Image (tube, rainbow, N blue to C red):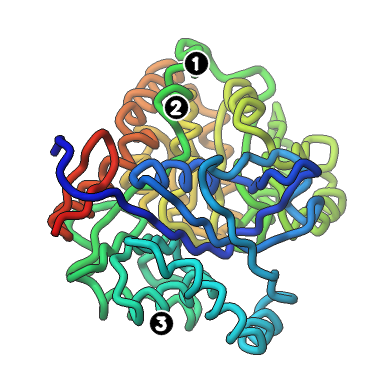
């Protein structure tokens, strides 16, 4: 809808994403988070962004940062200590502080956005419900139960089901037929803008490189299954597969040191490059050089890396998690699927894909065609339409306008 009816709106986004300041005071984070927050902010006239303050150079944050939305007012929270049980205890001890900071930050907001799962955004959802705010709740993990699903994940999804409807727009990252739950809708995930997609002009006619180049894109953390990929590469080496592919890991995170050690133990250090966290332009260059993107996640909703790869005509070999089957299609359509955490299956798939004669140009064209409508602008538009349908608001010049 268009027009000038309705009043301007403000959004408060609550995230546990670690962010840091440079020496000039500007805020940065990694991955697709800053781009998605800019997209969410574009639907509103004002934005408050509540994040977790991290020290520059912390694990997974050494370089490759992207600026947070310039017009957002950033409210930093103290970072909880440790991980797992220790982190939960840290949040519990500081609960009054977190609740106060979150509540004061969202007091003047018309809408609260909480990207779940995560302890801090779950607190944000609780406060938003108590304050009777309009909410946009977006679950980014695997909606389907799997071996990685925690009790906190189950509780979070139960809350979304319980409070779906009314003022609350509930979205689950993924895809497929039908809704994931009554009152909860599917939404894809991307950090790929229309301009970036247009700049990516891949050589769709190229064949497999003489030394195949594999690329992983994402955080180096246990749930991403990178150790499975390293072990599969070692199995190819042990079986004297030729030519042995080269693997680039584009990303950083808490498991990097352990993965570097594992690559050495497996005798694969010479064919594995740890590229670290890359800026979008550097990532695009890696995607343009690669032959195959391998994403061996143990759990996932809708990986942004799938679309980044497809935009460069790069087929994806992924674990059969989340929306992977929807995005990649049938075997060989835009990629291939293997069971998560299965070293033997991943090894066999790599051997088959790299050792069989395939029509790579046709495969690359199918990949590129699929991603044409999966941009950040389309993602933003879909979220805006969910809001207008749920709340009876309008959209004027791309921004949500409250009615009544």
Q: Is residue 249 above or below residue 345?
A: above
The x, y position of residue 263, in whole percent, is 81, 49
Cα gap from disc 3 to disc 1, whole angstroms: 43 Å
Marks 2 and 3 close (CB-CB < 8 Å): no
Front tag of 2 and 3: 3
Task: Identify the residue under disc 1.
Answer: 202
At 69% from the left and 35% from the top, the residue drawn is: 241
Task: Identify the residue under disc 3.
Answer: 155
Q: Quadrant of residue 153?
A: bottom left
The x, y position of residue 328, in whole percent, is 37, 40
Secondary structure found at label 2: helix
Q: Classify 10 Å Cα crowding around label 2: few (below 14), some (14-19), many (20 and above).
A: many
The x, y position of residue 174, in whole percent, is 34, 54
Task: Identify the residue under disc 2.
Answer: 311
Q: Is residue 399 left or right of residue 258?
A: left
Q: Classify 10 Å Cα crowding around label 3: few (below 14), some (14-19), many (20 and above).
A: few
Q: Is residue 345 left or right of residue 43?
A: right
Secondary structure found at label 1: loop
């Amino acid at each position: 809808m268009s027009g000038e009816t309705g009043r301007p709106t403000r959004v408060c986004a609550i995230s546990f994403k670690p962010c840091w300041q440079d020496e000039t005071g500007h805020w940065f984070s990694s991955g697709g988070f800053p781009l998605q927050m800019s997209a969410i902010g574009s639907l509103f006239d004002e934005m408050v962004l509540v994040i977790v303050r991290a020290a520059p150079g912390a694990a997974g944050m050494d370089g490759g940062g992207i600026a947070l939305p310039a017009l957002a007012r950033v409210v930093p929270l103290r970072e909880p200590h440790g991980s797992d049980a220790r982190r939960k205890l840290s949040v519990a001890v500081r609960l009054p502080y977190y609740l106060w900071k979150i509540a004061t930050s969202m007091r003047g907001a018309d809408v609260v956005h909480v990207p779940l799962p995560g302890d801090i955004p779950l607190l944000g959802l609780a406060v938003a419900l108590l304050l009777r705010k309009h909410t946009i709740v977006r679950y980014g993990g695997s909606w389907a139960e799997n071996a990685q699903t925690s009790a906190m994940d189950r509780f979070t999804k139960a809350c979304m089901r319980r409070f779906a409807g009314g003022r609350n727009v509930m979205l689950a990252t993924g895809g497929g037929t039908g809704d994931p739950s009554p009152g909860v809708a599917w939404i894809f995930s991307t950090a790929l803008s229309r301009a970036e997609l247009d700049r990516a002009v891949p050589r769709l006619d190229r064949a497999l490189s003489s030394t195949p180049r594999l690329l992983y894109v994402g955080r180096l953390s246990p749930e991403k299954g990178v150790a499975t990929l390293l072990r599969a590469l070692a199995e190819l080496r042990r079986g004297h597969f030729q030519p042995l592919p080269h693997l680039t890991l584009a990303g950083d995170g808490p498991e990097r040191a352990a993965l570097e050690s594992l690559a050495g133990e497996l005798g694969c250090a010479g064919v594995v490059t740890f590229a670290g966290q890359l800026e979008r332009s550097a990532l695009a260059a890696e995607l343009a050089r690669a032959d195959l993107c391998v994403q061996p996640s143990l759990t996932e909703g809708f990986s942004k890396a799938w679309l980044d790869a497809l935009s460069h005509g790069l087929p994806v070999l992924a674990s059969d998690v989340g929306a992977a089957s929807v995005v990649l299609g049938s075997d060989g359509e835009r990629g291939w699927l293997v069971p998560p955490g299965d070293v033997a299956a991943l090894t066999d798939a790599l051997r088959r894909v790299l050792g069989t004669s395939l029509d790579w140009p046709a495969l690359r064209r199918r990949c590129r065609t699929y991603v044409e409508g999966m941009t950040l602008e389309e993602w933003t538009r879909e979220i805006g339409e969910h809001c207008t349908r749920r709340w009876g608001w309008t959209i004027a010049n791309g921004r949500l306008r409250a009615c009544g």
